[in-house]
Amino acid sequence: MDVSSADMYTGGLIGMILSAGPMAKVVMVILFFFSIVAWTIIFMKYRQYKRTEAEGDRFFRAVKEADSFKKLISVYRDSQDNAFYRLVLACYKEVTSRQKDNPGRIRREDIPPIEDMLRIAISDESVKLERRLSFLATTANTAPFIGLFGTVWGIMDSFREIGVRGTTSLAVVAPGISEALIATALGLATAIPAVLAYNYFLGRLKRILSRMENAAIYLVNILEK
């Protein structure tokens, strides 16, 4: 396709969108809204998960060198806003609360409550990491049906024009069919990236939570030593 053909195609597509009926435009606006929000979430989650995985690598490097909680927490003084720091901090607070009567020592019966606190902390971080992923799932599930609604409406307009004008010529049928095809294309263009991103982030989330569970085991091992 040469440049002039591409310009004609782009102009024709924009022209079809601008000349679409009110209902078709409503469908397109809804799909554009879903698409913009979905892509915003995709970029935000990618940065969040990348940063969390980097902090996980940092944690495992630090925990192998640290021989106490104080030394481990000191590593995070310059970057406290991350999931692994909050995990360490929750464990440290639970430990210090149980050392009031016997500073510097952890009893064996204190280990299970500390493990429970670590599970709660991991659960809280899981909720934070999962936030807004449901919108991607909603977009993936609903966008094709919204586009299908626009398709059905465009076909209905085509049949109405046939009935009003009493002819089945291409000039009568084409506008409604074009609106229908645009709505279908927008629905698929919105849903496909959303479902791919949702499945991708679910896989990364599982890996992050698995690493956090391993981090909790490391912390308990430090206590038991």
Image (spheres, grey):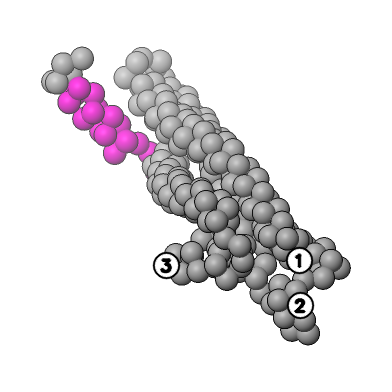
Q: Which mark is residue 160?
A: none
Residue 56, percent across and down?
A: 54, 51
> In the rendered image, is residue 181 in sight?
yes
Real-space Cα separation, disc 2 to disc 1, in angstroms: 9 Å
Where disc 3 sits, the SS reads loop
Q: Compared to 102, does 30 lie above or below?
A: above
Mark seen at residue 78: 3
Three-letter code for the amino acid on which mark 1 is drawn: Ile
Query: Tag 3: Cα neighbours inside 10 Å, few (<14), some, or many (≥20)?
Result: few
| Three-letter amino acid code of the residue under disc 3 | Asp
Position of residue 176 relative to residue 141, above or below, is above
Q: From this viewpoint, which residue is outermost toward the left?
A: 4
Magenta stretch, main secondary structure class: helix
Amino acid on which the number 2 mark rests in the picture: Arg
In this figure, which residue is indicated by the disc labeled 1? Answer: 114
Boundaries of the magenta span: 6-23
Please say if the residues under marks 2 and 3 sit with CB atoms less than 8 Å apart: no
SS under mark 2: loop
